[in-house]
Image (cartoon, helix red, strand yellow):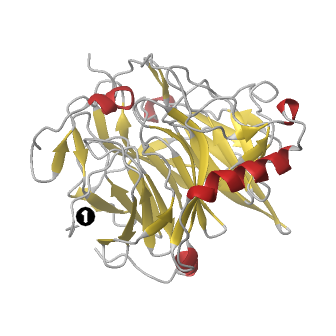
């Protein structure tokens, strides 16, 4: 059986495309074989006071100034990469195919793997201080998910009245070696207690990983992924509007229009009632297409693009009327590019980015916080990373404030 993409992509060579809309990716597979390459990070992320008499935050500041000193100065309006150093007890290992969800000023990092082992560890990063709280795998693992990677994690916020709100993280699917999952686990962010809701058995989607999810009108929407043998093209919805429901039920969405081919390791961004799906792979080809699912009309539309940019295992983060696509694999090699997709014109735009970009990588995570994009971890075909990088949006910092626009398809 062919080795999985993330362990073998660095050995790929250029091959002709099957069609104009695809880039051939001959060794991509949804099989579960693992690499035995040694884990390594190019630079050390964490500074621990136990190994250094200098306090953690001072040591981190010293290392940060040294790390970023090699970068050339940039115009004040230019977007700029820099290294972000954390301190405190952070992840004890490099991570890829993990999830990272921002709630307030805290970033919840869950699961993922290194070159071979999967984990079910939860870390919390205080974004205001770049301080990792202790990992919670020992004290709060009861009833939690098994070790997994390429799962999804969706933030659900509920209004409790009297100005109070609650937050939960819904973990779905993922895999560990030959095992693929179809279960839902819920983490109460306030108590850090896991629960597993009852699901009507015959409504559950098939086991999968490398899918995407979003929250729309109190429904978790799942698109695609892979089940270990093939890529998937289905869409499922889980109604979570009633937090006291004894049993939850999945519904398979019946859509019209031109659905995208089956795929995993794609990205999706919810823009009001429309879900924008980009890239991914079916185990053979690296896709460059963009599709939009109108969740109200339940209809797919394909976008006619001005440029063809194949990507898989990338991240796509909505920043106002743009989607910032960072890194990933283009069917030949891992990338460190920052691409901007205009959601109004449905076209790609080029912007110059200064500073020292992160090493090319895929299977990382990206979050938007305080008009900056933060990239955590990832994999380049050989190394699994434990670093954190920040993209300062500078003149584009106003973009998150743009909300009054529509996607016209």
Q: Quadrant of residue 289?
A: bottom left
Q: In this view of the protein, can residue 246 be seen by the observer?
A: no
Q: Decide if residue 167 is on the left or right side of residue 73.
A: right
Q: Decide if residue 15 is on the left or right side of residue 270.
A: left
> For this rendering, which residue is in front, 196 or 403?
403
Where residue 121 appears, x then y in whole percent? 68, 30
Q: Decide if residue 54 is on the left or right side of residue 389.
A: right
Q: Which residue is mark 1?
A: 301
Q: Is residue 26 above or below residue 406?
A: above
Q: Decide if residue 248 is on the left or right side of residue 316.
A: right
> For this rendering, which residue is in front, 50 or 308?
50
- Give the residue drawn at x 65%, y 37%: 44
Q: In this view of the protein, can residue 375 be seen by the observer?
A: yes
Count residues near mark 1 (Cα–Cα under 10 Å), then give few for <14, some for 14-19, many for 20+.
Answer: some
Q: Is residue 347 above or below residue 389?
A: below
The N terminus lies in quadrant = top left
- Give the residue drawn at x 26%, y 52%: 310
Where residue 222 appears, x then y in whole percent? 44, 46
- Give the residue drawn at x 11%, y 44%: 17
Secondary structure type for disc 1: strand
Where residue 351 appears, x then y in whole percent? 39, 72
Where residue 262 appears, x then y in whole percent? 26, 42
Q: Is residue 5 above or below residue 20?
A: above
Q: Quadrant of residue 26?
A: top left
């Amino acid at each position: 059986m062919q080795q999985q993409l993330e362990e073998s992509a660095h050995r790929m060579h250029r091959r002709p495309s099957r069609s104009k809309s695809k880039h051939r990716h001959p060794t991509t597979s949804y099989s579960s074989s693992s690499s035995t390459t040694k884990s390594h990070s190019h630079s050390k992320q964490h500074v621990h006071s136990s190994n250094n008499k200098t306090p953690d935050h001072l040591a981190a500041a010293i290392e940060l100034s040294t790390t970023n000193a090699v970068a050339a100065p940039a115009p004040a309006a230019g977007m700029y990469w820099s290294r972000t150093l954390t301190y405190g007890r952070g992840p004890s290992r490099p991570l890829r195919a993990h999830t990272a969800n921002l709630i307030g000023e805290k970033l919840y990092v869950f699961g993922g793997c290194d070159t071979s082992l999967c984990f079910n560890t939860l870390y919390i990063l205080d974004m205001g201080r770049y301080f990792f709280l202790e990992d919670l795998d020992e004290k709060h693992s009861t009833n939690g998910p098994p070790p997994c990677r390429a799962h999804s994690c969706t933030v659900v916020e509920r209004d409790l009245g009297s100005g109070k709100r609650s937050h939960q993280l819904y973990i779905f699917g993922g895999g560990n070696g030959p095992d693929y999952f179809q279960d839902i686990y819920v983490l109460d962010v306030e108590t850090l207690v896991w629960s597993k809701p009852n699901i009507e058995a015959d409504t559950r989607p098939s086991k999968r990983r490398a899918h995407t999810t979003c929250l729309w009108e109190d429904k978790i929407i799942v698109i695609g992924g892979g089940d270990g043998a093939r890529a998937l093209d289905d869409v499922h919805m889980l109604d979570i509007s009633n937090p006291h429901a004894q049993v939850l039920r999945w519904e398979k969405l019946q859509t019209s229009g031109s659905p995208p081919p089956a795929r995993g390791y794609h990205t999706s961004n919810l823009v009001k009632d429309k879900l924008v799906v980009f890239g991914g792979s079916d185990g053979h080809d690296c896709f460059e297409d963009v599709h939009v699912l109108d969740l109200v009309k339940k209809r797919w539309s394909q976008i006619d693009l001005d440029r063809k940019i194949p990507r898989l295992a990338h991240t796509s983060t909505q920043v106002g009327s743009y989607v910032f696509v960072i890194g990933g694999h283009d069917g030949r090699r891992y990338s460190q590019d920052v691409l901007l997709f205009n959601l109004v014109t449905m076209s790609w735009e080029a912007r110059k980015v200064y500073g020292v970009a992160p090493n090319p990588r895929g299977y990382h995570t990206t979050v938007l916080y305080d008009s900056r994009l933060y990239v955590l971890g990832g994999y380049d075909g050989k190394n699994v990373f434990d670093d954190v990088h920040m993209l300062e949006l500078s003149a584009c910092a106003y973009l998150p404030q743009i909300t009054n626009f529509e996607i016209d398809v």
